[in-house]
Amino acid sequence: MSKVIKKIGVLTSGGDSPGMNAAIRSVVRTCAYHNIECIGIYRGYQGMIEGDFKEMGPRSVNNIVNKGGTILKSARSKEFMTVEGRIKAHQNLVNAAIDAFVVIGGDGSFTGAEVFNSEFGYPVMGIPGTIDNDIFGTSHTLGFDTALNTVVECIDKIRDTASSHNRLFLVEVMGRDAGHIALNAGIGAGAEEILIPEQDLGLERLLESLRKSKASGKSSSIVVIAEGDKIGKSVFELKDYIEENMPEYDIRVSVLGHMQRGGAPSCYDRVLASRLGVKAVESILEGKSNFMVGILNDKVALTPLENAIKGNSEIDQELLRVSDIMST
């Protein structure tokens, strides 16, 4: 017999991403719709250990659907990685009569939730929130679409300068382990080359591509590089290498950094967050646990947390081919 759920907690963990607030809003209001109490857990798992809880109702999430970041804050918690820390967290949840929780975050956050579930049999549900889009079991994570729009807007502005001064710009975007942002934004912004961790382009092929671009009459070029690309130790070392071999290029580096994680979420991310929040709460009420709520073929779907953590979010091979053709 499933546990009767009367009170659900919600927390955001790991790196922030646009759409987290919209997901918090969705969880809170879905709880209210089903006459379930909702408790905000501040500062992720660290707040769970310290009992940093606050009751949330429909009016407490007014005017946050359009805001980036997370009103519940986020924090890394080394203490939660210990059995002692998780025991404290569990005791706080029991004392506050919280029957289950929804965690909005990435694979590290889901790993914590899965371990917690296995140790205490505690109902948990995950919502993927990370701009890198590197979670298995969903075509889009919260914040990915917004990050793409931010990156494309930045590259469009950089291209104006590149064209005016006949320069080569190396633009580094986020993506330590996955090239989804670089690949999609690179195509969207018309980059001449895109370097991602999943594909080792090689230094010589990059130089060959740049030489062809130069020979074809291109006076300026944009190369988009995921931060995890293996072609060089850093984007600045790559700049030095190209300058040594192609001194005719005036090269500039632009590292977009954390601006990609900020800003108002796109309409897509707001709608996605709302859909996933509803499904997360209603899945818990149906007695389900230890799943991630994601989107596949535009349908909301559940994936076991273990699969979401261990599965590979593969790069789109068709997009790679499109990128090759567009760089002609």
Image (cartoon, rainbow, N blue to C red):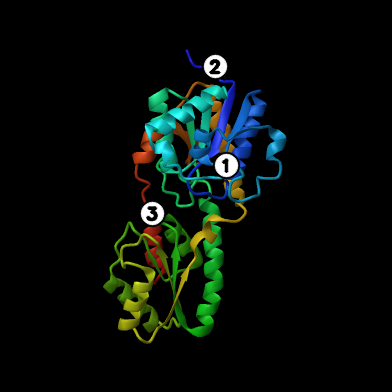
Against 137, residue 170 (above or below) is below
Residue type at tag 2: Val
Q: Residue 4 carries which label?
A: 2
Extreme-top residue of the structure: 1
Against 297, residue 94 (above or below) is above
User: How many numbered circles are shown?
Assistant: 3
Looking at the figure, which quarter contains the C terminus? bottom left
Residue type at tag 3: Ala
Label 2 – label 1 distance at C-alpha: 26 Å
| Residue 25 coordinates in the image, percent (x, y) | 63, 38
Against 214, residue 197 (above or below) is above
Judge from the rendering whether residue 312 lies leftward or rightward of residue 301; answer left or right: left
Q: Can residue 139 be seen in this view?
A: yes
Residue type at tag 1: Ala
Label 3 – label 1 distance at C-alpha: 22 Å
Q: Can residue 304 be seen in this view?
A: no
Q: Pointer 1: what residue?
A: 273
Judge from the rendering whether residue 313 lies leftward or rightward of residue 60; answer left or right: left
The label nearer to you, 3 versus 2, is: 2
Q: How crowded is mark 2: few (under 14 residues within 10 Å), some or many (20 or more)?
A: few
> Dot 3 lies on which element?
loop
Q: In the figure, residue 207 lies in which quadrant? A: bottom left
Counting residues from the start of the chain, the first of labels 2 and 1 encountered is: 2
Against 226, residue 274 (above or below) is above
Q: Pointer 3: what residue?
A: 178
| Residue 7 coordinates in the image, percent (x, y) | 59, 24
Counting residues from the start of the chain, the first of labels 3 and 2 encountered is: 2
| Residue 222 coordinates in the image, percent (x, y) | 45, 73
Label 3 – label 2 distance at C-alpha: 40 Å
Front in this rendered view, residue 99 or 137: 99
Front in this rendered view, residue 184 or 270: 270
